Amino acid sequence: MLLSYLVTSRARRELLRLLWGAGAEGSVSALARRAGVSFAAAHRELLAMRTAGLARTKREGVALVYSANPGSPHATLLRKLVEEDHAGPRPSAPDTEKVRTWLSAAGAPLLVSRPATGPMPSLEQVVAEAVALSHRDAAVARVLPLVLWRHRNGLDHEELVRQASLRNEGQALGFFLELTGRLGSDRRLKARARPLRDRRRTRARPFFTRALGRRELALTRARTPALARRWGYLLNMGLDSFVSTFGKHRDAAPHDFESRLERVLPRLKRLKASVPERHDLVLMKVLRCDEHDLQAIEEIHRRSPLDPSVLVTRYQQEMDSAIIEPRRLRAQLLVAIERLFPDQVDAVARRLKAPGGRRG
């Protein structure tokens, strides 16, 4: 505990543990995240360490990377002091694969090598860890808006902000909240993001932690979306990438379709295979409604007749947040009804226009 006694600044203590105990190196942002301190505190302490000869820097692309200075006359003393510190370095963050399995269990469309096992952290902790991981894993960054969207009504926002702040990720969480609000047209998420924006950041810095070469930096600057730049990030990932993933997976089915999944291939003993109930499957296909989908809908109806009242009821009650313009979705449903039940399409159209019918 001698280090804790001699060094009363938590930021300085954690950075000494990282540089001299764990042999870490990185930019101010990366070290601040690992130490769990603010960017401003890390920047101040690292500059002081460099001035005192305890840290050295090197340029990697646009990033200024800090590490322990083994040439310092105090190197032996510092290593001994950190090694004898009973508190030790901060616990290491969960490994990448573990965070990805947690995200997958939370509904993120991620490929994982194994399902999540054992007790999971709270959803707020999972999201905060995912925000931290997103600086190294672009796939995680791309699916985070989906996780935030699907759990927008169940997340404890105050606890989420606390968990993100512990990891020095309040700014990044704010960026993802506003991005999700924009993708899903949710004003609440945009409002929750607003207080997290650090307006002291006047210069954009790379969102991803890897060092950028001169050409890659120029490409990143050119491709950075305005939203990311407003949050102080340079991001070589256009909004179209987020829109594509969000549109493909967000509410592409009735809300409760998972509760109606039907098992197939019951002879399989070690594998449980399930498919959507046929009315749910038809509504999924209505979202795109090209000729291939319409022919597939006709084949489903031929094999097992559909009930138009079930289709309309689920459309009204469970498709309210599908990522498609409401008038277009209504028109596509009527096209499918016309294919299957031509004599009922006018009655369905009147039902949808009646009070209580879905807008559009």
Image (cartoon, rainbow, N blue to C red):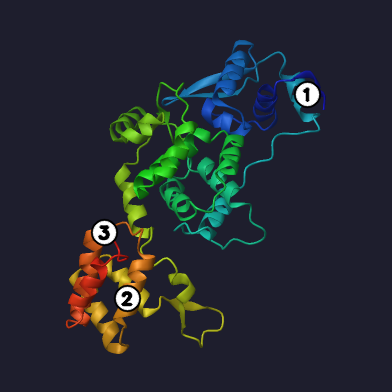
What residue occupies the far front of the structure in this picture? 355
Query: Looking at the image, which residue is at 23% across and 81% down?
Result: 298
- Secondary structure under badge 3? helix
Q: Give how far across and how far down residue 202 sits, in percent.
A: 41, 21
Residue 311 is tagged as: 2
The residue at 33%/69% (across/down) is: 315
Is 26 displayed left or right of 321 in the figure? Answer: right
Quarter of the figure that contains the N terminus: top right
Task: Report the Cα–Cα distance between label 2 and label 3.
Answer: 16 Å
Specify the quadrant of the image occupied by residue 279: bottom left
Q: Earlier in the sequence, mark 1 or mark 2?
A: 1
Q: Nearer the viewer, mark 1 or mark 2?
A: 2
For mark 3, does the 10 Å Cα neighbourhood hold few (<14), some (14 to 19), or many (20 or more) residues?
some
The x, y position of residue 318, in whole percent, is 38, 66
Amino acid type, label 1:
Leu
- The residue that appears at 55% across and 53% down in the rendered structure is 97
Q: Which residue is mark 1?
A: 3
Residue 88 image position (x, y, % from top left) = 75, 34
Q: Position of residue 159 (x, y in %)?
A: 60, 43
**Do we see residue 278 in this rendering?**
yes
Amino acid type indicated by mark 3: Pro
Q: Is 260 located above or below residue 248 in the figure?
A: below
Q: Quadrant of the C terminus?
A: bottom left
Identify which residue is drawn at 78% across, 24% down.
3
